[in-house]
Image (cartoon, rainbow, N blue to C red):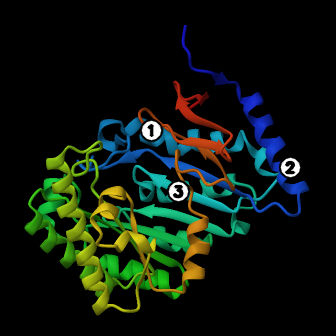
Amino acid sequence: MSHYIFEDISTYKQRWKKKLNAMNNDNSNNELFCIYIANPFCINKCKFCIYGSTKVDESPANYKKYYDDFLVKNITDFEDVLQIRTPDTVYFGGGTASLIPLNAMDKIFNAIPNFKQITHKYIEIHPAHFSLEKLNKLIDYGFTYLSFGIQTIDINILSEYNRKVFNTERLLKYIDEAKKHNIIVSCDLMAFLHDDLEKDTEAFKKSLSWVLEILQPSVVVVYPYYKKIFKIPFDEQEKEHNYLFGYSLRKNILEILKSNPQYKYCPKHLLSLNRDDILAHSKYDYFLFNMEEEEFFKIKKYFCSSPPNVPLNQNVLSFGGFQQQKPYSYISNDRCWFNINNNWKIEYQWA
């Protein structure tokens, strides 16, 4: 007999109705209600990715079914829940969220009650799988934050990791157009994609300098490739290895920021060059931003966090999921479930 606990949809919805009504009745409540839309498909499976996704060409019929009716039905099944309170955030993540077909965007967005009134709308974008037509659609619906997955500008590294190379001219057009509409643009970069520290240093510095100086996004998020580099617990050899890579990364970021003083960084302690601090925070992400700190932290507050890093004031209701991708939902730090797509029916399992 399985030790997992599944809840039927009516019980699950009642939990959310109770929570949202309580939030509405408490004027002093500063909790957030966020919804996450899972987009579990990719064109290529990038070798560095730690998230489950399904290749479109291996499952074209499922890709079509997912966006033609399944995702919309999953959302509309919760219309009575979503009518109780307009979400503070809607976040479209992946897989590759920018693979949502253009003709499906209207159906998905309109399935969410009061969609245009949602203040914070985020979407993750693979720059090689995007278009000006999709960008214009996002602008029409009032998206506020576009996260472009650059990772690196080194074509050889992209090829090595099976990630499609993007067109830099098109990317610049997307970013320039988004900025014209006051959309916050974020770019993701990865470090430690090389085992060779010297090669990694050179590739990372080129990528970060190019992003800051040419693209000039509002936010840059640097992700250490911890699946490959960092191992916990460390033995002494691994400690030395991780210290050298961590020291190099922080030193490079600080050096490049000197040439780009308009960018600040957080958390502050992450760029300390102290050995113990580097080893203690080896898996942390680095945020660089060219706005006031107060404004940045306000934006960051509305990101949808994943367990176990769940903020006490955040409640996330997730929709969708397919095969290996099982998005989490959670009510504060009290209850947590993940969606299991069982023959096109979502089951809600306690995590």
Mark 2 falls on what kind of element? helix
Residue 325 got which mark? 1
Q: Is residue 121 left or right of residue 227?
A: right
* Residue 306 at x, y percent in the picture: 52, 49
Image coordinates for residue 3, horizontal then vertical, percent: 56, 15
**Dots 2 and 1: beta carbons under 8 Å?**
no
Local SS, label 1: loop
Find the distance from the CA under tag 2 to the CA under tag 1: 31 Å
Q: Earlier in the sequence, mark 3 or mark 1?
A: 3
Label ID, residue 119: none
Kind of residue indicated by mark 3: Phe
Give the quarter of the figure containing the N terminus: top right
Give the residue at mark 3: 92
Q: Amino acid at mark 1?
A: Gln
Q: Which residue is mark 2?
A: 22
Q: Is residue 319 above or below residue 102?
A: above
Residue at x 18% of width, y 60% of height: 158
Asked whether disc 2 touches disc 3, contact meaning CB atoms under 8 Å apart, the reply is no
Q: Give how far across and how far down residue 74 sits, in percent.
A: 64, 39
The mark nearer the N terminus, 2 or 3, is 2
Indicate the amino acid at tag 2.
Answer: Ala
| C-alpha distance separating marks 3 and 1 | 14 Å
Q: Quadrant of the C terminus?
A: top right
